[in-house]
Amino acid sequence: MNVRPSTAVGAVLALCVAVFAAVAALVAAHGWTPFGFERGALDWVVAHRPHPAERAAELLTELGTGVFSYLFALAAGVLVARATGPHRSRPAAVAVLLAPVAWLAAGQLLRQGLMHGFGRPRPPAADWAFTAHGFAFPSGHAFTAALSAGLLALAVTRARPGAARPAATAAAAFAVLIGCTRVYLGVHWPLDVLAGWLLAAAWLALGALLFRSPIRALRGDRSPR
């Protein structure tokens, strides 16, 4: 039995939204305070944070936000624009090129709104090994890294379908690594990071659904949806 790609992506979207909502409800019911396992994880990393490892985590975590993320999104746009072929108008080409960047920016607005709406406090500043601002849930770095890497992985897959698995694996590994640095540096609770990953996966799936038909139309692609 063949499952349409759009059906599978829709299922991923629904699942991620449902789990995100469940995690948010669970943390809200706990008064937005850390669970015991979260406090235990933070205590462990603080006790096992030698300077070289801490420095490496600081360098890695910088890759999860800011200019690096938008470069990933722009690279995704370049790949998709090239994959649509030469027979398109200039405005359409620019729209395709900038679509991943715009989707990343829109996702940041959504994440910021949720973060301020939930208002979960960060771990105590005494445990931080990195500068942080704002509230904790969902993690901005975890969300941004997962979304930008996911956008690039989708673009690679569209340009070279045979590279789908390695692209997805690399994107997932990058997202996990960046998310883990946030807990290791003491600026997020584990559930903040999980929520960031879930929100990114949901936003990525929604983008894949919304932009699939316009891109197929530009390519003249008649493959099954």
Image (tube, rainbow, N blue to C red):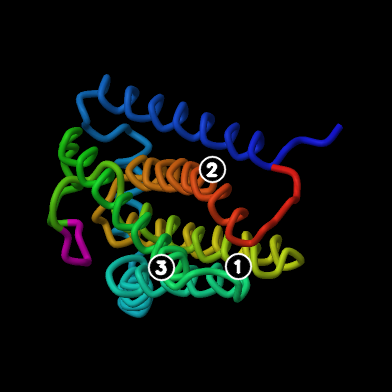
Query: In the rendered view, does 73 fall on the left or right side of 205?
Result: left
The N terminus lies in quadrant: top right
The numbered dot on residue 209 is 2
Q: Marks 3 and 2, Cα distance to the nearest angstrom?
A: 22 Å
Query: In the rendered view, does 140 fall on the left or right side of 222?
Result: left
Q: In this view, does 113 lie above or below 149?
A: above
Residue bounds of the magenta highlight: 127-132
Q: Is residue 97 magenta?
A: no
Query: In the rendered view, does 220 fall on the left or right side of 24?
Result: right
As drawn, which residue projects farthest toward the right? 1
Mark 1: amino acid: Thr
Mark 3: amino acid: Pro
The C terminus lies in quadrant: top right
Estimate how packed mark 2 is, as few (under 14), some (14 to 19) or many (20 or more) residues with alpha carbons within 10 Å.
Answer: some
Magenta stretch, main secondary structure, is loop
Q: Upstream in the sequence, badge 3 or badge 2? A: 3
Residue of label 1: 84
Mark 2: amino acid: Leu
As drawn, which residue projects farthest toward the top? 29
